[in-house]
Image (cartoon, helix red, strand yellow):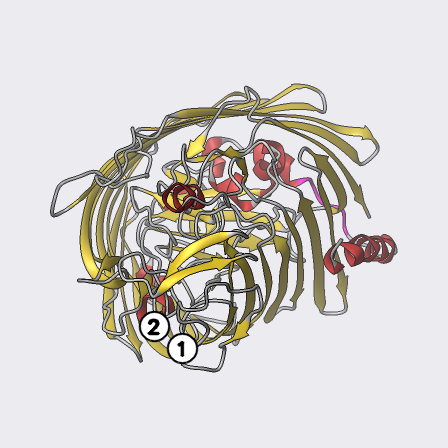
Amino acid sequence: MRVIRNQTIPLALALAGLASGVTAEPGARSSDDFYNLSLAELGQIEISIATGNSTPLDRAPATATVISAGEIQAMGARTLNDVLETVPGLHVSLSSLSRLDSIYSIRGIHTGFNPQVLLLMNGVPVQSSLQGSRPSLFRFPVASIERVEVIRGPGSAIYGADAYAGVINVITKDPSADTNNEMGVRVGSFDSKDVWLQTATQTQDWGIAFNLAYQESNGDGDRQVNADLQSTLDTALGTNASLAPGPLSTRYQLLDTHLALNSEQMKINLWSWISEDAGIGAGGAQALDVAGEDDSTLWMVDATYHLNEGQGEWDNSVRVSYLYYDLQSQFNLLPPGTLLPIGSDGNLNFTAPAGMVLFPDGLIGNPGQESTDAQAEFVSIYSGWEAHRLRLAVGAKKQTLDAREYKNFGPGVIDGTEGIVSGKLTDVSDTEYVFLENGSRNVRYVSVQDEWQIISDLQLTAGVRYDDYSDFGGTTNPRIALVWANNDNLTSKLLYGSAFRAPSFTEQHAKNNPVALGNPNLEPEQIDTLELSFNYLFNRDLQSTLTLFSYQARDMIEFIPDDMATTKTAQNIRNQNGDGFEWEINWKPITQLHLSGSYSQQDARDEINDTRIPDAPGQQFKTDINWEFHSNWILHGQLNWVGDRHRATSDPRADIDDYTLLNLTLRRKNILPELDLSLTLRNVADENAYEPSSGEIAGDYPLESRSTWLEITYQFN
């Protein structure tokens, strides 16, 4: 196997041996912490995502959800995606544009690369400036997560670009986390294996926490598709090159490590994420590709220094961060034996080909990138005025991207007269023929926010942020929120926010592509959102929340067909309007039983033709049960129904089928002292569930079939 696998298990064992000699204060297990709290107490959990300051969840000026490490453990989740699928109104779908990458579909904002949802790691953006979204095939193990904070709705007044449809902040375990040192192993279906280690200690004035997780899987071979793009080409050209019927390529290996260092005034986070030999789903061109892969290396460092925390009326801090991301893709865009019409520019051309070319080794393209994000921010919080808390932030960021590419087709490689082209690749990285020019942008921003406690039960939060981009100019995004604790039981929120999404480097500068071309004159996408929320606490153990929302999204970027050409160019072309509601209920009839459920509905439409936005679920229903039915025995169940998904008007296929998935986890705590055992079944009923494809893959993308997972965890001091 690959280097990542050969080194990980010995490394974990060595670190476990080192950790066994470390003395740390034992803490209560996080699962107990969460499930022993009443719903009223849970509402007082402090979150930071809504305002950039610590705020009780039930008074936060946003539609917010918090998922604790205890909940994550109880549900048997393996990755961040498993966790996010439990959030009301959020659905984790699959991209038909990018290797079956994850789409976080929120309130009908559902696009192929999904740059409209901002992911933060401990408050720092995690993005690939190539497409504007998360790193390619981003799978994040849950072992290092202390909690996940999610807001549905805009967040640009605090976080700037891409906090458009929602913001997700993953907070990792640090020395202050009240958790035991732990080792764990999980084995399951599809030849899958997980190993993790977490430990923390205190030395002099510094706390140190280390988390490591390794995961690998061969993927579910039953996720079969019957036809792909090459099947269509075979029919048209009389060839027989398609690999369909065949399975989607969903194998992966990844290593995730975190090191946190905390002192009284300083916090440092070091993060490394390495993904190797990751299968590319339905293929880079919607033609099955069993050999293709993505190899990613990401590392990030962020440091926060508090100048005078807890000393008077001012809390001033400086934060610097640096993210490095390297991606190398290897695509067999079309399989060996494909025969293609090639234009004089070396790309596919069905209207005016220069000749028919046979590719006995396949049409091969290996694009890559190396990108960096460097950011510095100063935040000052002033609480010297009665009933006010003022937050001022100024900062700057620099993004760079260097592209590279190796291929056996395209400009500078072939011209359509060759007849036969082998698998020998040409390096066009530093030439005019590369798929994307090297690029950079500078961003400067300033934001101000005031939290005003007008009276004891009425708070107004108002803020605005201005961002200045070196490539497209400036954008201003305000927010205002009124939170009224009507009485001891009812809390009402009226929220307005504006947000923007910056064009990605691909949307601005893509070239030499047979399909998509960039446009340097793009403007940012904009959205205005209005929300009205009511949270009613019937008693300490029964509460319900209803959130109504309406938004107007404009200047959304799509690739539009060019006149008299086979290419598409990025344009600010679409406006979208949406409205709907999200209803949640939580009930703890007894201490040992926690029931929750949510139902969400959205109606998102194209403003011009009034048609439903394709692929996004119009309705979702989710239920969750956590039941300690006997001492140290816990049963956790999840049911998730996804429905009311429509096709694009240009797609003649019937609407996407609804589906219901049921997951169960049985956990036995302390089967031996400090040793827990759990069994998880996912998709218990073996439901034939599908996420929508673009059409080249017949019958949509099948989800995983029924799977079984056995987990052992050991807590040590």
Magenta residue check for 676:
no
Q: Which residue is mark 2?
A: 509
Q: Quadrant of residue 414?
A: bottom left
- Residue at x 58%, y 68% (from the top left corner): 424
As helix, strand or loop, the secondary structure at mark 1 comes to: loop
As helix, strand or loop, the secondary structure at mark 2 comes to: helix
Query: Which of the labelled discs sits on residue 437, or is there none?
Result: 1
Q: CA distance from mark 2 to mark 1?
A: 7 Å
- Residue at x 44%, y 75% (from the top left corner): 434
Residue 433 in picture, x, y percent from top left: 41, 77
The answer to whether marks 2 and 1 mark residues whose Cβ atoms lie closer than 8 Å is: yes
Q: Quadrant of residue 660?
A: top left
- Residue at x 39%, y 47% (from the top left corner): 237
Q: Which residues are magenta?
A: 25-29
Residue 142 in picture, x, y percent from top left: 61, 46
Amino acid identity at mark 2 = His
Which of 278 and 354 lies nearest the eye of the viewer? 354
Instruction: Classify residue 245 as left or right of residue 658.
Output: right
Q: Is residue 384 visible?
A: no
Residue 621 in picture, x, y percent from top left: 38, 27
Q: Is residue 143 visible?
A: yes
Amino acid identity at mark 1 = Glu
